[in-house]
Amino acid sequence: MVLVGLDAHNISQKYNLSANLWNSGSKGKGKGIQCECDLLISHCCSTLHTSLVGTKLVLVNQTLLSIMKTILTTAIAFCIFLITSCGPKMVPFTGDMERETGLNKEQLKKVQFYNSGPIFLIREINNNTTEIIRGEIKMKDGKQLEQIVIPPNTRGVVINSNSERLGISFESGTDRYLVFGQNQHQSNAYTILAKDWKNNIGTVQYDGRDFRINTETANIHLMVNVKRLKSLKVHSRTAKGRSVGKH
């Protein structure tokens, strides 16, 4: 064991201990030497005690810091759990769900839809014509591109619908909507429909113009809040029929 802070040379100088004192036969000097030795031992013990106390304090501080980190991590995890568990339960909107709820066209317009991921719409701008640009302008390979981004979980509403297709609008504007249809490869979830696929790039109509999307955007599906969807009650009755001669 190494005693930190004990310097024998400095201690010897401090108490002025020398070989001459030890070799002298004087009783008075012997008593002085005894006092000096007692002081030396006392100083050594005091220094050792201070070193050990400091070590204990460091260990205690490290232990407290570790405990605080554990408590903080647990608290953050618990808060995340509360937020996710108390939040709305979002599920993909599928053809089966549409049939089970029995929602008609007008009732579908009351459903709040969300997109499961980011939607990127891109088109090339013709430099020789004057156009009204509504999205973000980017340059790529010397070409001007217009990009429209629809962030994840953006609210959308049905503006038109027909057999297994929904026109969903995420912003105001008559022609600003995307067509979603049932995708058999995703359990009949409603995903973006595109045409003219080539090299994993498809074409969609948006705001009266042709935009390109990739396969990742095409796999984005519609989501709904289960609780709110169930709250839409479908009132239905069955006709009993009428007999001849009876009013």
Image (tube, rainbow, N blue to C red):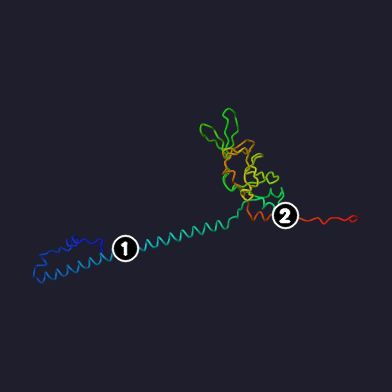
- Closer-to-camera residue (126/5): 126
- Closer-to-camera residue (165/112): 165
Q: Residues within 10 Å of mark 1 (few under 14, many from 20)?
A: few
Q: Position of residue 170 (x, y in %)?
A: 62, 44
**Is residue 51 placed above or below 97 in the rendered structure?**
below
**Is residue 89 placed above or below 28 in the rendered structure?**
above
Identity of the residue drawn at 35% across and 63% down: 59
Q: Position of residue 179 (x, y in %)?
A: 65, 43
Identity of the residue drawn at 57% across and 47% down: 117
Disc on the earlier residue, 2 or 1: 1
Amino acid type, residue under disc 1 in the picture: Thr
Q: Could you tell whether 104 is left or right of 171 in the image?
A: right
Secondary structure under the numbered disc 2 in the rendered image: loop
- Closer-to-camera residue (155/53): 155
**Is residue 216 placed above or below 5 in the rendered structure?**
above
Q: Position of residue 203 (x, y in %)?
A: 61, 38
Residue contact between numbered discs 2 and 1, judged by CB atoms under 8 Å: no
Secondary structure under the numbered disc 1 in the rendered image: helix
Question: Residue beneath label 1, please?
Answer: 55
In this view, the residue farthest toward the right is: 245
In this view, the residue farthest toward the left is: 25
Q: Residues within 10 Å of mark 2 (few under 14, many from 20)?
A: few
Q: Measure the C-alpha gap from mark 2 to mark 1.
A: 73 Å
Identity of the residue drawn at 23% across and 66% down: 44
Question: Residue beneath label 2, please?
Answer: 234
Q: Could you tell whether 140 is left or right of 93 in the image?
A: left
Q: Position of residue 151 (x, y in %)?
A: 57, 45
Amino acid type, residue under disc 2 in the picture: Val
